[in-house]
Image (tube, rainbow, N blue to C red):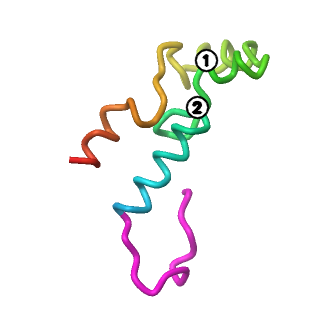
Amino acid sequence: MERPPEDHWAVRDEEYEQQLLTRYYDFKGWTFDGIPTKETLEKLSLGYVAEDLIKRGILTGNDVTALKDPRAKKENE
C-alpha cells in the first residue's frame, strides 16, 4: 500500500518504484514487508514490541532487512 497516487507521474515504472521502496525499507532496518526487524526494535529499546510481534507470528526473530530478503533478489534479476 506504499504507492503514490495514480496521477503522480505521467509514466509509471512499478518495478523501479518497488526497488526504491525495498531500499528504503532496508535503510530503515525493516523487512521486505515494511515491518521493523527484531534487531531494529531492540536498537530502539523496543524489544518488548519485538517479542509481542514474534508471539503473534508477525516476526520470526530471524528476520532480515529488505535487501537481504530473497524476494528482493528476484526483483533485481
Name the amino acid type tagged 1: Glu
Q: Is residue 18 left or right of residue 26?
A: left
Q: Residues within 10 Å of mark 2 (few under 14, many from 20)?
A: many
Instruction: Residue lying at the far right in this picture: please name it.
Output: 45
Of the residues under marks 1 and 2, which one precedes in the sequence? 2
Residue range highlighted in magenta: 1-14
Q: CA distance from mark 1 to mark 2?
A: 8 Å
For the N terminus, give its image quadrant: bottom right
Q: Residues within 10 Å of mark 1 (few under 14, many from 20)?
A: some
For residue 70, above or below residue 11? above
Name the amino acid type tagged 2: Gly
Would you say the residues marked 1 and 2 are in contact, meaning their CB atoms lie under 8 Å apart? yes
Q: Main secondary structure of the magenta part?
A: loop
Q: Is residue 27 magenta?
A: no
Residue 74 on image: x %, y %? 25, 43
- Which residue: 51% across, 78% down? 6
Residue 13 on image: x %, y %? 37, 71
- Which residue: 38% across, 62% down? 16
For residue 59, above or below residue 11? above
The answer to which quarter of the image holds residue 42 is top right
Query: Regarding mark 1 in the picture, which secondary structure is present there?
Result: helix
Q: Which residue is mark 1?
A: 39
Residue 74's tag is none
Q: Which residue is mark 2?
A: 29
